[in-house]
Amino acid sequence: MTFFKNKKNNNEHSTKKIVFSSYQIFVITILSIIQFSVVLDFMVLSPLSDTLIKELKINTNQFSLIVSSYAFSAGISGFLTAGFADKFDRKKILLFFYTGFIISTLFCGLSPNHSLLTIARMFTGLFGGVISSISFAIITDLFVMETRGRVMGFVQMAFAASQILGIPASLFLANKFGWHAPFIMIVIFSVLILMIIFFKLKPVNKHLELKSEKNPYKHLLSTITNKKYITGFSATCLLATGGFMLNQFGGAYTINNLKITKDQLPLLFGITGLFSIITGPFIGKISDKKGKYNTFLVGSLFCMLMVGIYTQLGASPFGLVLLVQVLLFIFVSSRMISSSALMSGVPQPKDRGAFMSINSSFQYLAGGISAYFAGSIVYQSTDGVFHNYERLGYVVIASMVFSGIMMYFIHRGQNNTNR
């Protein structure tokens, strides 16, 4: 079911004016807000890293375990649900997993120590880890290829919005009421979103009319062994490496190495998010007009440059740190938006739900491994300074090079017919 009003056009660089219906705008908005809540729940650990390490009296390896426990359980969840992802109305699947995400996040907010927080994060990943794949499957069902870059640009604004709105608010609550408070805030907000989904989102079930493997396990196996899909899964693993490695210690690194104060941290994340949220739709538009792979390639080249600079900064003025972080996040967004849009054209319609779930699993499993590996590379001395951070930068840059090669093969094999 495609609600796009214009006629089919196989040219990715079409300059026709894009007109979305009011319901399409609602879908984009609600999916963006869902992404915002899930992304905030995951990203809030980064600015809270310094607080959690100190208050829970844990080391970098133990903190990495909190991060990677979410990723590993999210990866397992994706595989478990992949076979069933195309067997049900996507709205019902979204409601089920979003409810589980809310309950699990509540337990995070109630956890008194490192062990229980780690377990709570495992359950949060079990439910929250597949929500993005469900959202992307809905987007692929409802929007044609020529518009997906633009749609992904809006939906991926959730990452920026979590910085400009969510993370500063979370840091404020954490500084005032303790590290549990941000999770409780996410729960209250998400309950309201759940009600809107239940009453306003229409069923997304057109894919049920398509012929697909009836046995869910055979459907899972046929999808995961599809040679065309394997390239996409491989690219996703490489794309996940950088974000998980750098993000988990972002707050602690900024405070202890770059010497930005806790009071400045909300402003830093807020301004960075503001620039990202402004540039997101523009990047999506460029991706549709100039080519998704071209946008990805340019974004990757500049992103590698900024990673190299960021990971080797010492104590720096606030303005310099802000400039570097703003540019870094803009180029990270350009990679995310263009790669998500390009990847959406890989699966056949009958396999979309399964492909997205499996793809999400590989993303989180690769991210979990890289996050735990990062905790082994980086160590914190008694004065609070993080060491070997530049080595993380080298690993991330290498992963970007290889991901660029994999995305080229996806781009080359991508036909320009609408799916």
Image (cartoon, rainbow, N blue to C red):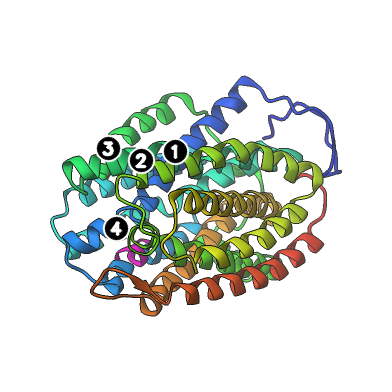
What distance separates the C-alpha of mark 2 from that of mark 1? 7 Å
Q: Earlier in the sequence, mark 1 or mark 4?
A: 4
Question: Residue pushed farthest left?
Answer: 112
Mark 2–mark 3 Cα distance, whole angstroms, equals 12 Å
Residue indicated by mark 4: 121
Quadrant in the picture for the N terminus: top right
Q: Residues within 10 Å of mark 4 (few under 14, many from 20)?
A: many
Q: Are marks 3 and 4 in contact (CB under 8 Å)?
A: no
Looking at marks 3 and 4 on the same chain, the residue that comes earlier in the sequence is marked by 4
Q: Amino acid at mark 2?
A: Pro
What residue sits right under mark 2 in the picture? Answer: 168
Marks 2 & 1, CB-CB < 8 Å contact: yes
Q: Nearer the viewer, residue 361 or 302?
A: 302
Element marked by disc 1:
helix
Query: Which residue type does callout 4 highlight?
Result: Arg
Q: Nearer the viewer, mark 2 or mark 3?
A: 2
Residue at mark 1: 164
Q: Is residue 206 visible?
A: no
Q: CA distance from mark 2 to mark 4?
A: 21 Å
In the structure shown, which secondary structural element does the residue marked by tag 3 occupy?
Answer: helix
> Which residue occupies 56% across, 56% down?
354
Q: Looking at the picture, which amino acid does disc 1 mark? A: Ile
Q: Is residue 143 left or right of residue 196?
A: right
Q: Which residue is painted at 16% across and 49% down in the image?
A: 110
Using the numbered discs, state the Cα–Cα distance from disc 3 to disc 1 in whole angstroms.
16 Å
Which one is in front in this view, the residue at disc 2 or the one at disc 4? Answer: 2
Name the chief secondary structure element in magenta. helix
Residue 112 relative to residue 170: left or right = left
Per the model, the C-alpha gap separating discs 3 and 4 is 16 Å
Other residues around mark 2 within 10 Å, as few (<14) / some (14–19) / many (≥20): many
